């Protein structure tokens, strides 16, 4: 009995209805779709302010590969074309800034500095460079090439075009003959990356909405991304992962509607454009067409009489994705470089293998599992600051437990009843195939990492390419499934439990970053904050205003979360919130699932 009640709380049960007028049905769906709950609005605002805090909490140049990303952005901002994969070395200006600002010595080593995996430069208030003497791009050496090849040219150009456009717009708008200080431009680019990642809480709620899940689950899903400090760390720095994360999250939201019957050409067009943009951002996105195909197969499987619409939607999405992003890979092949050429193939060779080396699968699995998990949760910068292993273990247990409970909470509709249910006007309950499509982006991104890392291990004996951040493109699907599980395990307290988990994880991450990068060794929090403000590119007054806004909005979010838990019963019939999306919109008609939900909302 309890299990059945819990399932009713989590999913929309099938409802037989008499068909209301189509126009009123569509209006009801669109009216409900436009109302974002206050807790989700608050969560999105807090997420953005937290990302802004993370963007100043890490010294410039200290994020993974950040100097190389920044160098390519500033190179394009000079008006230069996008180079070939082996056509550029790192620029002098960014290298000098990195040596001046980065804490990790191995990020940009100086001539007399000892490079180790953990050596860092002290960042105290006393040794901060004066604000009035900070150099601009040209004063720091400009675009002159030095050092090794910039390996970021292995990536498609969309992210770098977008970021360089921001630099060029800033230089055009700001008055004066000289350029702004380079550290200020660097900090501005970090904030631009914040804008790419800030919609994730909204995306989590939106995906739940399009699936037809109860409103409280959507609120919980909007809070889950807060529990991954590494996500906010990467999301607040220069990294093309951020644009891919946004596009993959958007695709997940669109496909959540597709598996529930949204086979409109408008949605298919959105799927195709978003997939194409992802392909033009990073080669990892080659797995996303598989997710798209799986979603349309599931949609056809559910609505057996709509094969023609499913095929039309999938074809539209495929053609648009090739037109928008596939041309990059076709061009590479025609130039003789292969699909995704990189200078890393010439660097990572068998010369690293010791004599007598042979692959050891158990050893590799242990190392891969440990490094991947720890780097998913919180190995910051060049891995010089890390959250505690106890917190990582606890967070892993919580997340996997919640996801397991989420998968167990849904059931698949019997195949024999699909056509009959559609003919009778019954809205299908969410099933495990829907959950599978949501988790497919994270699964395929993870499989890509496994295959690449194992290949490099066999070639070089090195444990490389093991980055937990590479699955952040699947974070929305993870958040939705985890939210379903948390809601089942904790009932009405789901939002409060998730909020508490997020507070613990964010506190641990920010505490580690503050003490690891700022102030003299052994100094207290006050000295650490002073050092952060002294080194920062933004005025101290602006940081104070941001901190006050963060505290105020976090208080608002806490109140909204408490009210959500107070209003939610332990187990009750599904809420009347309609799922997002308007299947059949291209014909101006509401589909049967829309009509059922609209009727329930009236």
Image: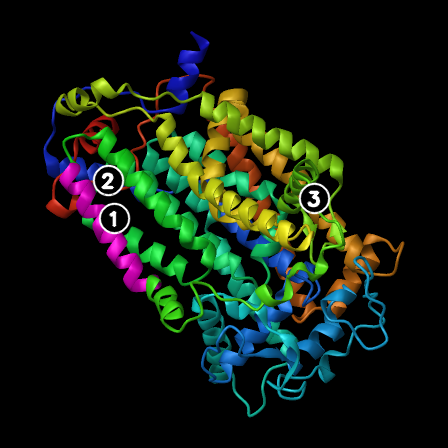
Camera-side mark, 3 or 1: 1
Quadrant where the N terminus sits is: top left
Q: Is 531 above or below relative to 218?
A: below
Q: Is 497 above or below relative to 147?
A: above
Q: Would you call the spot at circle 3 few (<14 residues within 10 Å), some (14-19), or many (20 or more)?
A: few
Q: Would you call the spot at circle 1 few (<14 residues within 10 Å), some (14-19), or many (20 or more)?
A: many
Quote the CA–CA distance across marks 2 and 3.
40 Å
Residue 520 is situated, as x and y percent measured from the top left of the image, at: 87, 61
Residue 373 appears anywhere in the view: yes
First in residue order: circle 3 vs circle 1: 1
Image: magenta residue range: 307-325
Residue at the spot x=38%, y=67% of the render? 333
Query: Badge 1 is on which residue?
Result: 267
Residue 162 is situated, as x and y percent measured from the top left of the image, at: 45, 70
Q: Is residue 319 magenta?
A: yes
Label of residue 262 in the image = 2
Secondary structure mostly taken by the magenta-highlighted segment of the chain: helix
The secondary structure type at the circle numbered 2 is loop
The secondary structure type at the circle numbered 3 is helix
Quadrant where the C terminus sits is: top left
Residue 35 is situated, as x and y percent measured from the top left of the image, at: 34, 42
Q: For the residues labelled 2 and 3, say whether their Cβ atoms are less than 8 Å apart.
A: no
Residue at the spot x=40%, y=33% of the render? 436
Left or right of 480, for residue 540: right
Query: Badge 3 is on which residue?
Result: 507
Q: For the residues labelled 2 and 1, say whether their Cβ atoms are less than 8 Å apart.
A: yes
Q: Is residue 41 magenta?
A: no
Q: Nearer the viewer, residue 329 or 309?
A: 329
Q: Would you call the spot at circle 2 few (<14 residues within 10 Å), some (14-19), or many (20 or more)?
A: many
Left or right of 514, for residue 564: left
Residue at the spot x=78%, y=59% of the render? 517
Q: Is 448 above or below relative to 499?
A: below
């Amino acid at each position: 009995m309890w299990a059945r009640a819990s399932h009713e709380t989590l999913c929309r049960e099938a409802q037989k209805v008499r068909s209301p007028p189509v126009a009123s049905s569509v209006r009801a769906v669109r009216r409900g779709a436009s109302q974002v709950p206050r807790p989700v609005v608050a969560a999105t605002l807090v997420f953005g302010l937290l990302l802004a805090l993370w963007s100043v909490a890490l010294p410039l140049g200290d994020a993974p590969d950040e100097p190389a990303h920044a160098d390519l952005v500033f190179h394009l901002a000079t008006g230069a074309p996008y180079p070939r994969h082996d056509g550029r070395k790192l620029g002098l200006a960014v290298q000098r800034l990195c040596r001046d600002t980065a804490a990790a010595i191995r990020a940009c080593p100086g001539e007399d500095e000892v490079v180790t995996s953990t050596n860092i430069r002290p960042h105290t208030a006393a040794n901060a460079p004066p604000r009035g003497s900070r150099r601009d791009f040209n004063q720091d050496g400009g675009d002159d090439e030095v050092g090794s090849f910039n390996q970021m040219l292995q990536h498609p150009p969309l992210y770098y075009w977008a970021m360089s456009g921001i630099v060029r717009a800033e230089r055009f708008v700001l008055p004066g003959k000289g350029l702004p200080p380079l550290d200020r431009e660097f900090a501005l680019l970090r904030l631009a990356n914040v804008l790419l990642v800030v919609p994730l809480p909204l995306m989590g709620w939106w995906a739940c909405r399009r699936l037809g899940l109860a409103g409280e689950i959507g609120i919980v899903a909007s809070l889950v991304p807060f529990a991954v400090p590494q996500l906010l760390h990467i999301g607040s720095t220069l990294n093309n992962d951020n644009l891919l994360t946004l596009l993959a999250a958007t695709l997940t939201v669109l496909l959540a509607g597709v598996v529930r019957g949204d086979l409109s050409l408008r949605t298919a067009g959105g799927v195709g454009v978003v997939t194409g943009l992802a392909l033009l951002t990073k080669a990892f996105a080659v797995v996303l067409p598989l997710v798209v195909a799986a979603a349309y197969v599931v949609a056809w499987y559910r609505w057996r009489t709509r094969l023609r619409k499913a095929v039309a939607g999938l074809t539209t999405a495929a053609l648009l994705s090739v037109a928008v992003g596939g041309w990059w890979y076709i061009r590479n092949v025609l130039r003789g470089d292969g699909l995704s050429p990189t200078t890393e193939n010439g660097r990572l060779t068998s010369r690293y293998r010791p004599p007598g080396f042979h692959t050891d699968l158990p050893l590799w699995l242990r190392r891969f599992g440990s490094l991947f998990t720890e780097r998913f949760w919180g190995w910051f910068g060049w891995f010089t600051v890390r959250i505690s292993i106890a917190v990582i273990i606890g967070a892993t247990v919580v997340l996997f437990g919640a996801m397991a409970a989420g998968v167990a909470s849904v059931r698949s509709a019997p195949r024999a009843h699909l056509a009959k249910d559609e003919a009778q006007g019954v809205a299908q309950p969410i099933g495990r195939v829907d959950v599978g499509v949501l988790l497919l982006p994270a699964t395929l991104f993870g499989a890509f990492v496994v295959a690449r890392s194992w290949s490099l291990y066999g070639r070089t004996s090195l444990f490389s390419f093991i980055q937990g951040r590479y699955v952040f493109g699947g974070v929305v699907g993870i958040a939705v499934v985890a939210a379903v599980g948390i809601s089942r395990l904790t009932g009405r307290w789901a939002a409060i439990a998730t909020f508490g988990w997020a507070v613990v994880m964010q506190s641990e991450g920010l505490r580690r970053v503050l003490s690891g990068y700022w102030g003299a060794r052994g100094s207290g929090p006050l000295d650490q904050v002073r050092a952060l403000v002294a080194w920062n590119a933004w005025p101290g007054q602006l940081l104070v205003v941001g901190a006050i806004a963060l505290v105020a909005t976090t208080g608002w979010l806490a109140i909204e979360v408490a009210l959500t838990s107070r209003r939610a019963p332990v187990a009750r019939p599904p809420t009347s919130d309609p799922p997002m999306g308007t299947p059949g919109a291209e014909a101006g008609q509401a589909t049967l699932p829309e009509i059922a939900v609209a009727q329930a909302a009236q």
